[in-house]
Image (cartoon, helix red, strand yellow):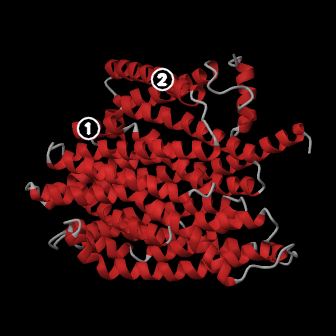
Amino acid sequence: MSNENHTSAKSADSGNFLMQGSILAMAGILVRLIGLFYKVPMTRIMGREGIGYYNTAYEIYNIGLILSSYSLPLAISKLIAARRVRGRFQDARRVYLCGMAFGVAVGAVMTAVLLFGSSWITEHIFRSPGSALPLAVMAPTVLVFSVMGIMRGYFQGFGNMIPTSVSQVIEQIIHAAVSITASYLFLRWFADTANPASYSAAGGTLGTLTGALAALIFLSCQMLRHRKKQAALYRQPQTVSTETWKQVFFALLLTLTPIILSQFVYQLSGTVDNSLFGQIMDGKGLSEKERMSLLGVYGGEYRLLTNVPVAIASSLGTSMIPSIVASKTSRDGAAVQHKIRLTVKFNMLIAIPCAAGMCVLAGPIMRLIFGDSSDLARNLLTIGAPAVIFFSLSTVTNAVLQGIDLMRKSVTHSAISLAIHTVFVYVMLQHLNMGVYGLVIGNVTFALVVCVLNWFAIGRALRYHQEVKTTFLLPLFSAAVMGAAALAVYAGITALTGRYQLGILVSVPLAMVVYGVLIIRTGAVTEEELPDMPFGMRLLRLCRRLRLLP
């Protein structure tokens, strides 16, 4: 193949995986937005105490999910992608079937642990007995996710993110509808009990289960629909002998174990925060209701909001892993580096302005979305907004390490960061009396340490260096100007009209336009890079028509 053809193929491949990632990212953002908007009425129904129970139960459930099924889509997609690129479709089928058996087994075990151990876990580890009921209601979701994760991993391994994207949207819509309805009804039906907020939280977690069941039904229909196409692939002769079931199982286990450990340690920071906060604040005399109210603002408002843009990083990382595996299997090192560079840059172009916007408009955003005009809510978002950048970057770099078979590094780095984070948060809670502010600062520093360690490992393994000026510095400059403009316009309109809603309605779209123009005019995004990005040709034509290109 000529150099020109190779470059063209590489660009097309990069554009395709980034487009697939963008489909997943758009679904992820839509899912997070639905989650954000349904949490608003649900928070108002439950109150801060109820949402505190809900978030504590969800943190425990999330650990169970990570230990059993959360990493199954990544592992399955990676194994299938490696076999697909070599034309080993019969081996890919065995990966799917073996993964399904594994997923059902571990999902069932973890469901039993959470279901029958809910009272002990919530009472002795988190000092939150009121979280036991919502955790027990949510426990069967782990088994549902285990089965669903194998199906999602199968489609992702073949480079098709659409079934995963659609299933996520379906899941969240059903989740939202049932959570709002059930939390309201449970609060009314059990109003005379000792802890009605706990029953209301259980109504919220019932939505998690029903949403997962709806997504599973959709994915099952998709698998049946593609049965003929799959059968044709499996009948194709392989150039090498078919792997035995034992070989497939050990390949799955070797791939899955470091991913599970990495995700477990990486996601454990939230659970550590809740546990430390419960234990230490209980010792300082705060009642369960007071602790749950503070955690309700931290988890139900601050973390919920900052997780929306991080969904882009998670989706791009998910789509990048099979693509990097395919390029690595083909021994195309240039393509691997090109995909990493493009994904990181596209991610930062979105994460940096999101963090800046949340920082400068923290108060009105919290007031508009959650109806919370307290200084606590505003300060948490202002201080913790940089976490959007660091969590986005650490999520993508973790995906890179998994894609280039350095998953142990990902585990090690997350463990080092978690150890530092635990000591740091303990000191801030126990000795500096920083309360919930200590959790926010710890949230930012945890992701920052992971980022730094991951970059050193990727640089050593691939001799890779991310371009700094256009990936970080120019977007930071553009976001700073954007933030100043947004704050000035918001303050002016609010002062003139007295309506903060109108100030946000005008300042946010204006900020997006200012940022978009600046990243083009400063050269953060070049004319050559635009076609590689999602909807890049349309953006390129628009920039040419408006004469924005330098």
Q: In the displayed structure, does residue 538 sit left or right of residue 486? A: right
In the rendered structure, the answer to whether residue 165 lies left or right of residue 1 reads left
Q: Secondary structure at mark 1?
A: loop
**Quadrant location of the N terminus in the rendered image:** top right
**Which corner quadrant holds the C terminus?**
top right
Q: Is residue 174 left or right of residue 321?
A: left
Please name which of the two marks, 2 or 1, marks the residue nearer to the observer: 2
- Note whether 110 is above or below 487 in the view shown: below
Residue corresponding to mark 2: 482
Q: Position of residue 17 (x, y in %)?
A: 70, 49
Image point (87%, 75%), residue name? 236
Report the disc number at residue 88. none
Which comes sooner in the sequence, label 2 or label 1? 1
Cβ–Cβ under 8 Å for marks 2 and 1: no
**Residue nearer the viewer, 96 or 306:** 96
Q: Is residue 309 visible?
A: no
Q: CA distance from mark 2 to mark 1?
A: 24 Å
Disc 2 is placed on an element classified as helix
250 relative to 381 in the view: left or right: right
Question: Crowding at label 1, few (<14), some or many (≥20) Cα neighbours within 10 Å?
Answer: some
Q: Which residue is mark 1?
A: 373
Please name the residue shown 82% across and 67% down the image. Answer: 87
Which residue appears at 39% of the width and 26% of the height? 503
Amino acid type for the residue under numbered disc 2: Met
Disc 2 residue crowd, few under 14, some 14–19, many 20+, Cα 10 Å: many
Three-letter code for the amino acid on which mark 1 is drawn: Ser
Residue at 65 percent of width and 83 percent of height:
246
The residue lying furthest to the right in this view is: 2
Classify residue 403 by image quadrant: bottom right
Of residues 520 and 489, the one nearer the viewer is 520
- The image position of residue 338, as x and y in percent, is 70, 41
x, y percentage for residue 408?
A: 52, 59
